[in-house]
Amino acid sequence: MPDRFGPRGVFAFLIPQQNANMHPEYELMRPDGVNNQMYRFDISVHDQVAEAVLATLPQCHGCYPDMIITGNSIEMQNWSPNIQADYVQKLNDRAKGVPVVTATDATAAALKTLGAKRIAVLSPMSEENSKSAQAYYEGIGFEAPYGTWLEVKESIDIIKVTVDQILDAFQRNNHEDVDTFLHVGGALGMVSMIDELEQKLGRPIVSSNAATYWYAMRKHGITDTRDDLGKLWTMDEVVD
């Protein structure tokens, strides 16, 4: 519930222990009057991330949140729309009536809001991660013929990727028939780069952390906009 530090709302974020950038990025995006609270789960066992999130979620009730937000791009792990629907139901069961936003649903809503049809996907780690994300977004109605990945071997090293490396990866996805670029994977730490990258590429970028916070605000009724975080953050309504 709103408190002295968050008169407009308290957001409880579930983020991986291993992702050092997500907390500062959420603070960068936090509008005045919102209280961000962080709860961490372990992603060291990659095929048990959903279980780790579900086990940690009950802790979020300790800050009396107005919204619970899961910040990881779980669609990189052999995911499907049916699995996502079941996962969201399990999250809602544990949330006890508190609204829940997932990064995966937020990213899909961001793509729809921008009018995306044909996308290119970038993931920070493996080819397998990228292809899983491509398959997921194709499963919910987007064309996703292109994907690339940064081949970062260890989660701890993702935050070290430079702007030039990220731009190079997007350029590999820069096909003329792509209308929107999609970055999945919250550990990359590129929120502050989105505006610059969009200017260079000439098309919008949906980046998971930026999409997640934007969507959470809109679902909570906050319509603040910004012009330094890419095209998405200039839009004050969601197209679901």
Image (cartoon, rainbow, N blue to C red):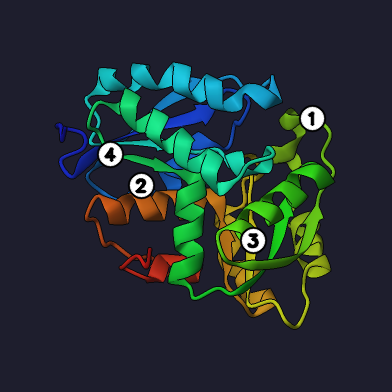
- As helix, strand or loop, the secondary structure at mark 1 comes to loop
- Dots 2 and 3: beta carbons under 8 Å? no
Q: Residue at x 79, y 69 (%)?
A: 171
Judge depth for marks 4 and 2 and give the one in front.
4
Q: CA distance from mark 4 to mark 1?
A: 33 Å
Q: Considering depth in this image, is 146 or 42 the residue closer to the camera?
A: 146
The quarter in which the N terminus is drawn is top left
Are there few (<14), some (14-19), or many (20+) residues within 10 Å of tag 4? some
Measured as percent of width and height from the top left, residue 19 is found at 61, 31
Could you tell me the amino acid type at mark 4?
Answer: Pro
Relative depth, front residue between 212 and 202? 212
Q: Position of residue 34 (x, y in %)?
A: 26, 42
Residue at mark 2 to residue at mark 3: CA–CA distance? 31 Å
How would you rate the neighbour count of disc 3 (Cα within 10 Å): few for under 14, some for 14-19, many for 20 or more? some
Q: Which residue is mark 1?
A: 154
Say left or right for 116 vs 224: right
**Mark 1 Cα within 10 Å, few/some/many (few <14, many 20+)?**
few
For disc 2, the marked residue is 30
- Mark 3 or mark 1, which is nearer to you? 3
Instruction: Name the kind of residue labelled 3 in the image.
Output: Glu
Where is residue 44 drawn, in percent x and y? 68, 20
Residue visible at 66% across and 44% down? Answer: 188
